[in-house]
Image: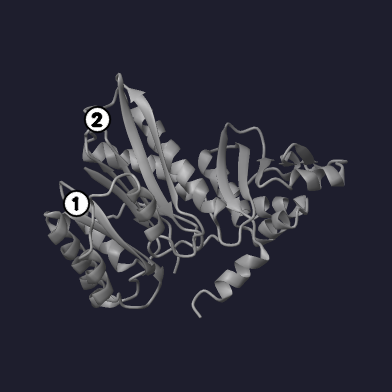
């Protein structure tokens, strides 16, 4: 069985449309993807090429083309060089062992500097269940993924492919993935730009012999979320030009939705991200970003903490030590906590800083 979530960008790449249709099949046997070309804004020919990729791969795998999902990442607006795709698929070799994991992860890289993969196991009903996956993406990262409303209705990219040896019926697998993605991939950002190609897929083959139902759903869901979170943080840590992984925790909100909105608004602020790069404890930028998120709160209850240094408390600056605050912003893993009141809800978002290299990479990406 298979589940998938796709970009909510109104401009959707051809492989997104094709994969959403193929996902309706009762069986999915694999994923075929390419890097370097997004196959987006390529019209009917682009959709034909996406389907052709599935046909070529299916011929080697001995399955139907509709039993394969297809993804692409890279530059927008160029037709796929199908002669290269066909030549590559003719060299298919699925006989290799574990080393193929890193090879596949590397094959998906665009401006990524390292391959990203992770796996974890958990004992469920006395049997080890495994969830593993790979992800790519370092730019055009502001994922906002969800299920496609109906088949066909609807640059760098975030792609994530996960597998599990649990046996899970399709609807349960879909709801599990959606819940995990909302709290992980949909809560990270590098630049706030939602790609046309963002896709996260989860395939379950049942090899463990463990069936996931209502009684063990929570344990399985936590395992899927763990793998998604580790992969999502790897994406942010490798963000274009990034030097820091930043966790932004918003607490005291009325609802989780409010907390998430504020956390991502702060995480996407260029002024916040450049201050983090410069180790500048400019809490005013954090207060500004929280206040413009569109979530009502009492500014007199606002408090901000950089690492372990409280810089703003209940609407007023604290008498903090500047050198201590700068030192708190030095680590490659930085935590920022923002409290907006006494509400019960909280949310974490993950981002990175904006360095000089971010501008250089994106100014020269196409040319």
Left-right relation of 288 to 145? right
Q: Residues within 10 Å of mark 1 (few under 14, many from 20)?
A: some
Q: Position of residue 360 (x, y in %)?
A: 61, 72
Question: Which residue occupies the foreground of this view, 274 or 252?
Answer: 274
Question: Which secondary structure lies at badge 1?
Answer: loop
Q: Position of residue 134 (x, y in %)?
A: 39, 49
Q: How many marks?
A: 2
Question: Which residue occupies the foreground of this view, 7 or 65?
Answer: 65
At horizontal 45% and vertical 50% (from top left) the residue drawn is 116
Q: Taking the image as drawn, is residue 153 in sight?
A: no
Mark 2 and mark 1: Cα distance apart in space: 24 Å
- Name the mark on residue 52: none
| Residue reaching furthest to the bottom | 367
Left-right relation of 363 to 155? right
Q: Is residue 257 above or below residue 11?
A: above
Question: Which secondary structure lies at badge 2?
Answer: loop
Left-right relation of 339 to 39? right
Q: Taking the image as drawn, is residue 135 in sight?
A: yes
At horizontal 30% and vertical 74% (from top left) the residue drawn is 80
Q: Position of residue 315 (x, y in %)?
A: 78, 43
Q: Position of residue 129 (x, y in %)?
A: 32, 30
Residue under circle 1? Answer: 24
Residue under circle 2? Answer: 208
Give the label, 2 or 1, closer to the camera: 2
Q: Residues within 10 Å of mark 2 (few under 14, many from 20)?
A: some
At horizontal 49% and vertical 64% (from top left) the residue drawn is 111
Q: Is residue 229 above or below residue 293?
A: above
Question: Which residue occupies the foreground of this view, 321 or 290?
Answer: 321
| Placement of the N terminus among the 4 image quadrants | top left
For marks 2 and 1 on the same chain, the one whose residue lies earlier in the sequence: 1
């Amino acid at each position: 069985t298979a589940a998938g979530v796709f970009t909510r960008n109104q401009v959707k790449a051809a492989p997104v449309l094709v994969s959403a249709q193929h996902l309706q099949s009762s069986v999915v046997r694999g994923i075929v993807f390419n890097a370097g070309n997004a196959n987006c804004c390529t019209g009917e020919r682009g959709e034909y090429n996406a389907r052709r990729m599935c046909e070529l791969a299916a011929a080697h795998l001995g399955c139907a083309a509709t039993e394969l999902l297809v993804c692409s990442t890279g530059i927008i607006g160029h037709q796929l060089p199908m002669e290269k795709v066909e030549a590559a698929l003719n060299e298919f070799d699925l006989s290799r062992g574990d080393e193929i994991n890193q090879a596949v992860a590397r094959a998906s890289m665009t401006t990524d500097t390292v391959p990203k993969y992770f796996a974890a196991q958990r004992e469920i009903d006395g049997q080890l269940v495994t969830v593993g996956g790979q992800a790519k993406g370092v730019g055009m990262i502001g994922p906002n993924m969800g299920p496609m409303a109906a088949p066909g209705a609807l640059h760098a990219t975030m792609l994530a492919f996960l597998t599990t040896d649990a046996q899970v019926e399709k609807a349960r697998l879909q709801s599990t993935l959606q819940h995990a993605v909302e709290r992980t991939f949909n809560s990270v950002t590098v630049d706030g730009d939602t790609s046309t190609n963002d896709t996260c897929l989860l395939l379950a083959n049942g090899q463990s012999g463990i069936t996931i139902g209502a009684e063990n759903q929570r344990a399985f869901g936590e395992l899927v979320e763990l793998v998604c979170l580790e992969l999502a943080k790897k994406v942010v840590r490798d963000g274009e030009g990034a030097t820091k992984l930043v966790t932004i925790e918003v607490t005291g909100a009325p609802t989780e939705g409010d907390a998430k909105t504020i956390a991502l608004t702060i995480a996407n602020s260029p002024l916040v991200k450049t201050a983090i790069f410069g180790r500048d404890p400019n809490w005013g930028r954090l207060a500004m970003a929280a206040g413009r998120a569109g979530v009502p709160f009492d500014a007199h209850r606002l408090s901000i903490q950089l690492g372990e240094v409280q810089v703003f408390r209940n609407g007023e600056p604290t008498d903090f030590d500047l050198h201590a605050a700068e030192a708190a912003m030095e680590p490659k893993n930085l935590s920022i906590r923002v409290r907006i009141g006494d509400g019960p809800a909280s949310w974490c978002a993950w981002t990175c800083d904006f360095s000089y290299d971010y501008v250089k990479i994106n100014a020269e990406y196409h040319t």
